[in-house]
Amino acid sequence: MVLTLNHFLALAAVVFVTGMAGFVVRRNAIVMLMCIELMLSAVNIVFAAFARHHGDAGGHVFVLMNFAVAAAEAAIGLAILVEIYRRRRTVDVDELKSLME
């Protein structure tokens, strides 16, 4: 069986919708960050699939840049969440309405 562009796009759609649903449904900030990572991974799948389909390396460059952005986002986001947890003892976003208290 040959994998076509449609297979990759369907996989990316499933991964993106899973991440989006998790982001909307869950209230834990760490789970929300993981769902954002899922959505970024879906975008990487689309970039790589189109680069492969068109025979161009430009999409792979965007994938590498997206990996760098995702790593920075995860590192900074987790550092912020660790500091919030130290101060508030929770990472539930419903309880973190105001960071000024």
Image: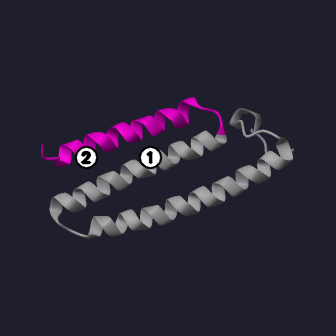
Of 76 and 1, which appears nearest the observer? 1
Q: Secondary structure at mark 2?
A: helix
Instruction: Please tell me whether mark 1 or mark 2 is closer to you in this view.
Output: 2
Say whether residue 76 is left or right of residue 20: right
Q: Quadrant of the C terminus?
A: top right
Residue plotted at (16% across, 62% down): 54
Question: Is residue 95 one of those drawn in magenta?
Answer: no
Say whether residue 6 is left or right of residue 101: left
As drawn, the residue found furthest toward the front would be 1
What amino acid is labelled 1 in the image? Answer: Met
Q: Which mark is residue 39?
A: 1
| Helix, strand or loop for the magenta stretch, by majority | helix
Contact between marks 1 and 2 (CB within 8 A): the answer is no
Q: Which mark is residue 56?
A: none
Residue plotted at (40% across, 36% down): 17
Q: Which residues are magenta?
A: 1-28
Q: Which residue is mark 2?
A: 8
Image location (x, y in percent) of residue 67:
45, 62
What amino acid is labelled 2 in the image? Answer: Phe
